[in-house]
Amino acid sequence: MIDGYKDFVFIDQKGYPMTGAYYTSTFGNLVKKYNKSHEVALPNITPHILRHTFCTRLANKNMNPKSLQYIMGHSNINITLNLYAHASLDGVKAEMVSLIA
């Protein structure tokens, strides 16, 4: 039990919850191993990159920004909107077409 929490899903060999540093190290090792045997190298992959990709994909699927804010734990909606609500000409055209239909 840590700070009143228990029954963690991902634990290490000693029974403690996995930390961000563990995943950063593991991803780094996996990328190095992959890059040694492949011509096209993978970029650096971190837990934060996975988090950002997850949120970007939800935003691209038009998830409600307030729901996205809640999932990501952002204290302010402006953080969510400024990081993940990217406008593009194609996206604007598609929105206008959907309003007409």
Image: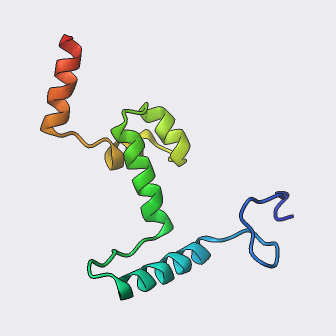
Q: Position of residue 10 (x, y in %)?
A: 71, 64
Q: Is residue 5 above or below residue 32?
A: above
Q: Position of residue 45 (x, y in %)?
A: 42, 71
In the image shown, does 90 or 36 lie closer to the viewer? 36
Q: Position of residue 88 (x, y in %)?
A: 17, 40
The image shows a total of numbered marks equal to 0
Q: Residue at coordinates 42% horizontally, 56% vertically from top-left?
A: 52
Q: Residue at coordinates 42% horizontally, 63% vertically from top-left?
A: 49
Q: Residue most toward the bottom?
A: 36
Q: In the picture, residue 12 is in which quadrant?
A: bottom right
In the image shown, does 31 or 85 lie closer to the viewer? 31
Q: Position of residue 22 (x, y in %)?
A: 61, 77
In the image shown, does 76 or 14 lie closer to the viewer? 14
Q: Is residue 96 above or below residue 24?
A: above
Q: In the picture, residue 32 is in which quadrant?
A: bottom left
Q: Is residue 94 left or right of residue 74?
A: left
Q: Residue at coordinates 17% horizontally, 30% vertically from top-left?
A: 92
Rendered-image quadrant of the C terminus: top left
Q: Residue most toward the top?
A: 101
Q: Is residue 32 above or below residue 70?
A: below
Q: Residue at coordinates 42% horizontally, 41% vertically from top-left?
A: 58
Rendered-image quadrant of the N terminus: bottom right
Rendering colour mode: rainbow
Q: Is residue 9 left or right of residue 95?
A: right
